[in-house]
Image (cartoon, rainbow, N blue to C red):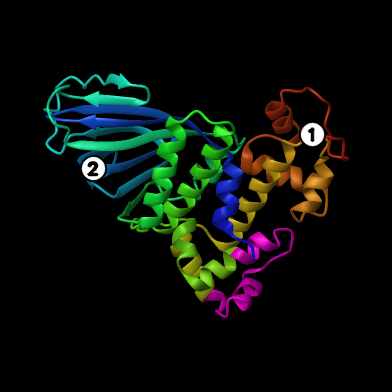
Amino acid sequence: MTDPLAEVIAMLKLRAALSKTITGTDAWRVRRSEQGQPFYCAVLEGACRLELEHHDPLTLNAGDFVLIPAAYHFALTSIIPPAADAEDTLPVKVADGHFRLGDLHAPAQVLALLGHCVSDSSDAGLLVSLLPEFVLARDEKRLALLVALLRDEAQAQRSGKDFILARIIELLFIEAIRSTETLATPGLMRGLADPRIAQAIRLIHQQPARRWTVKELASGCALSRSTLFERFTAMTGITPMGYLQSWRMTLAMQLLCRSGVSISAVAEHIGYNSASAFSVAFTRHVGLPPGRYAQQRSGKHTDVNNSGSTV
């Protein structure tokens, strides 16, 4: 059976760029800007606070795990943060992969594992848009096991380390997202939480080239056409046909980055009768013709046309 969440995470092609532990005491604040990279934080002992743009501050206690699939500006602070105009705290490196915030000699009030990842996908922004804005999971035993594995692997020097870290990161993403408490905003995960809408999403992922109609999807989910349309849109923030179009373009961008794949082959794979019809739809959705998109992503300047020349 097709698993939409696993597909999206696999397509992101995540790898760990940084993983470290921090301890802190007294009043401290560290501001971060990850430029849209995925960020995670697992509180191992004590407590701290997360300040996210457009959200109320979150108190994080031991056992809590936060994942931000596309992090920009945010801050980690002590439970009682310093004054808003106070200078940011400078982390002090006390060992390889371990940093101290605040008084170096006072007992630590928090121990946390945090880090960020890099996506090697050419269309990471589109994929991330399908995921929740942020994920908060509390006291999840399976997550705790994965966090322990990540910490151990990140601090060790073993052969195959990068490969293992990438797999653990993927598992962390999936486990955190499916155990999240934060499904208040529309998106893929809110849709997957509804059995009928999840079935519609799976049908689209199983047969993206099929000429689906809302009526056919509704029949496959045992819902009326109007009920599916209304519930799907409310849950995911996009219409069923809009989601189908978005997923087709996601697949197209993945395929166009492969050497030797023709535009006509991509068009056929995602359900278009002709390369020209696909090119029009792709250009409208992405902002670039498929040939130019492929050239930019590959760094090559091969002539590509709508008659099926290779990418």
Q: Is residue 212 magenta?
A: yes
> Who is closer to the viewer here, 309 or 39?
39
Q: Image quadrant for the N terminus?
A: bottom right
Label 1 belongs to which residue? 259
Q: CA distance from mark 1 to mark 2?
A: 48 Å
Please say if the residues under marks 1 and 2 sit with CB atoms less than 8 Å apart. Answer: no
Q: Is residue 237 visible?
A: no
Q: In terms of image quadrants, where is residue 26?
A: top left
Q: Nearer the viewer, mark 1 or mark 2?
A: 2
Q: Residue at x 57, y 50 (%)?
A: 8
Q: Residue at x 57, y 70 (%)?
A: 199
SS label for mark 1: loop
Q: Could you say which quadrant of the image residue 114 lies in?
A: top left
Which x, y percent locates residue 204?
A: 64, 62
User: Is residue 21 among the parts visible in the rendering?
Assistant: yes
Left or right: 303 in relation to 21: right
Q: Residues within 10 Å of mark 2 (few under 14, many from 20)?
A: some
Query: Left or right: where does residue 118 sit relative to residue 296?
Result: left
Residue 160 part of the magenta-drawn span = no
In the rendering, which numbered label is found on residue 45?
A: 2
Vertical relation: 173 (above or below) 27: below
Q: Where 215 sits versus 157, above or below?
A: below
Q: Position of residue 106 (x, y in %)?
A: 12, 27
Range of magenta residues? 202-226
Mark found first going from the N terminus, 1 or 2? 2
Three-letter residue code for mark 2: Glu
Residue drawn at x 82%, y 25% as measured from the top left:
302
SS at mark 2 in the image: strand
> For the C terminus, which image quadrant?
top right
